[in-house]
Image: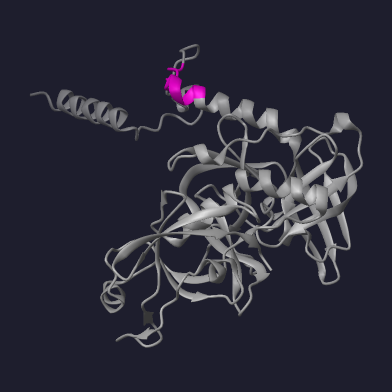
Amino acid sequence: MNRKFTLMVVIGTLLLASLACGFFVPNQASPAAIIPTLEPGQPVAPIIINPEVLDEQNLLIALYERVYPGVVSLQVLTPNGGGQGSGFVYDKLGHIVTNYHVVENATQIEVIFSSGLRTYGEVRGVDLDSDLAVVKVDVAENELTALPLGNSDELKVGQTVIAIGNPFGLSGTMTTGIVSALGRTLPSDRQAPGGGVFNAADLIQTDAAINPGNSGGPLFNLNGEVIGVNRAIRTVSSNSQGEPVNSGIGFAISVNIIKRVAPGIIQNGKYDYPYMGIASISDFSLEMIDALKLPQFTGIYVTGVQPDSPAARAGLQAGNQETTIGGLLSGGDLIIAIDGRPIKIYDDLMRYLVSNKGPGDEVVLTILRDGGQVEISLLLDKRP
């Protein structure tokens, strides 16, 4: 073969290979040095979005625009410095619902609306048991967008929820998540007789991002109804300033508690909770069940009865016999139902009481005692 022809074939082959691999560098002066991936005027293929995803997105956008005017930010001064939190407009009379711990020891409260309006607020009353507070502002009625309240009894685990608030001072922040659990309890800020503290009940657990500054802000359902007030997070991490950050476990006070507590605060400056006067356990290990000789795995075992309490007057009995576990006494009552509703754990009892009953109401407890089942009527008092 002609050597010149062979050389031309080799060069041509290398040239084609380099073009295919993108390594060919033409003359620097050539305008063809940049090779576009699309020819001028060639349309870009559209991204197809699932209509259901688009509908949910539009729903969240519309929800935010509708409810955000009713969400407020709070700037609080105390003798020890300052803090911030969130709240929401409860009614057209200028009542703002927030957390007690947001306004605790406040010497000055500044309420900031989404419109940019700023005004001072005064604490109308607080409730240490639920960690709720009501702040009163004096502004024109057209500045107040009262938010609708839902029904927390209708909530289901897995339901979508939305939090809007002022985390780290970033007002108007919206986060989404689901209801992770219902009927949780947390310690309240009020001391109980005989030591310890009372419990706050009927809390909603959620994985919606809640951080410092979200406290007191509303938790919504997809209808734009308030179904809770964000209260606390459980976390093992913090930022560079030492502030706790979200770990996917947040708690909100259920709206049905708010419906009972907020009117009481507005009218009387406080709210009275129902009170039984027992100490109990309900998280039994197999060893404890054997030691107590319990006939079932669920229920509330009475470990103590407060003197001169509703429980004492009704004749509830605490354990009084030594067991193989130090400090654990057998022979006490096991509460398995209240007003015919099964009770599996302590949270079930507290949720029913604080959501449905008040001081002066009567309840019927179903208990297991000495191998038999007994029903006892108990007249509730108010927490001392």
- In this image, 102 relative to 352: left or right? right
Start and end of the magenta stretch? 44-55
- From this view, report whether residue 225 is shown above or below residue 288: above
Pick the front one: 267 or 113: 267
Identity of the residue drawn at 75% across and 49% down: 264
- From this view, report whether residue 277 is shown above or below residue 271: below
Pick the front one: 296 or 50: 296
* Quarter residue 368 falls in: bottom left
- Give the position of the N terminus as an image quadrant: top left
Residue 233 point in image, percent of width and height: 57, 59
Identity of the residue drawn at 61% across and 52% down: 361
Pick the front one: 40 or 332: 332
**Image colouring:** one colour
- In this image, 90 relative to 156: left or right? right
Residue 211 point in image, percent of width and height: 62, 55
- In this image, 259 relative to 186: left or right? right
Can you see residue 60? yes
Can you see residue 228? no
Pick the front one: 259 or 99: 259
- Give the position of the C terminus as an image quadrant: bottom right
Instruction: Inspect the magenta stretch and tell me whether residue 358 lies in it.
Output: no
Residue 237 point in image, percent of width and height: 53, 66
* Quarter residue 287 falls in: bottom left
Residue that protrudes farthest toward the left in the picture: 1
Residue 349 point in image, percent of width and height: 48, 57
Residue that protrudes farthest toward the top in the picture: 41
Give the number of callouts.
0
